[in-house]
Amino acid sequence: MSTSRSRPPPTDDGDGHVAPPRPRRILLSRSVDICGPGENFPKGCAFSPDGLCVLTATAHDNSLRLYNTPPLPPAAGGGAPEEGDGEGEGEGEEEGDEKDGGGGAEIDGDGEASPDPQGAPSSSFSAPSPWRSALVSTPSGGCRDAVRSYSWYPLMNSSIPSTCMFLSATRDCPLHLVDAYDGAVRGSYRPYNGLDEMEGPGVAAFSPDGERVFASGFRTDRTIHVFRTDRPGRDSDVLRLGRTRRSKDGQKGRISTLAFPPLDAAAAAAHPAVFAVGTYSPGSIYVYDDRTAGGVVMGGDPA
């Protein structure tokens, strides 16, 4: 029995027009340096705000890896697509569809390179180039645990070195502000709990304007520590989600995620200062008014 895969047949859109099969994804590059003993794998990944870098944390070696985005191949034919050839008509198609290109390898569902979408051998086929990290950063200051959270500085621009930085949160360690060029720690933020003990956060994020650092996900308190980005240290504003860890008021559960709306004119007009907080069991999402000391805009608890 043959195990070869065939492409799905063209589909009818209901109006008698047969839609051509969608082009396959183009593989630009493939990482070759996430290896080592044991299970080493990326725990998420995040593009830099300018789109030129990809940041990830790897599980086994407790490292942060930064990759430069591989260059895009030239468009097929070397020029602008002709009218009606399908290129440029993808507006409204589901997210993730990519245009055909001549400089990369197309990817089958099993991750293998394949010929062009028409089934004929591709004369422009080229193997993906090896993708090695431009920076490997390990937690400093004796921190050897896994990286729990990382976040790009939202105004990061690769042409302005002073903006090239990201947050790195590791259990039982301060929250570090890391230089994206050389991995040096530019500053450390130290949240202290009610027992006056420094406690490393499990979640960290910048405010959309980059002026503040939010840290949470603590084991001992239902709190969010808010630092000024330009003032590393232990001084912070403390937002409490409840009077105590075990009290029944406010949002319950250990914080698992923080999210902010994008910094643009439309979002600023609709929601000038809000942020969302998600928690582990009992799972919930609350949206808070950032202009008050704990005003809840809306809350979503499990039924």
Image: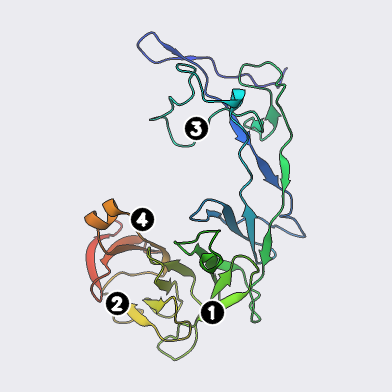
Q: Are circles 4 and 1 on residues that touch, CB within 8 Å?
A: no
Mark 4 or mark 1: whose residue is earlier in sequence:
1
Q: Which callout, 1 or 2, points to the residue nearer the camera? A: 1
- Who's the residue at 63% across and 19% down the image? 6
As drawn, the label of residue 126 is none
Distance in Å between CA atoms under marks 4 and 1: 25 Å
- The residue pinned by badge 2 equals 242
Instruction: Give the residue pinned by disc 3.
Output: 97
Q: CA distance from mark 2 to mark 3?
A: 44 Å
Find out whether the residues at labels 3 and 4 contact each other: C-beta distance under 8 Å.
no
As drawn, is 248 to the left or to the right of 65?
A: left
Report the side of 211 relative to 135 (left or right).
left
Q: Dot 1 corresponds to which residue?
A: 187
Q: How much space separates mark 3 and mark 1, taking CA atoms?
A: 40 Å
Q: Secondary structure at mark 4?
A: loop
| SS class, disc 1 | strand
Q: Earlier in the sequence, mark 3 or mark 4?
A: 3
Instruction: Name the residue: 74% across, 54% down.
Output: 33
Question: Which is more N-terminal, label 3 or label 2?
Answer: 3
Crowding around mark 2 (Cα neighbors within 10 Å: few <14, some 14 to 19, many 20+) is some
Query: 194 or 101, which lies in front?
Result: 101
Residue 111 x/y as whole percent: 66, 35
Q: Residues within 10 Å of mark 3 (few under 14, many from 20)?
A: few
Closer mark to the observer between disc 3 and disc 4: 4
Q: Nearer the viewer, mark 4 or mark 2?
A: 4
The residue pinned by badge 4 equals 262
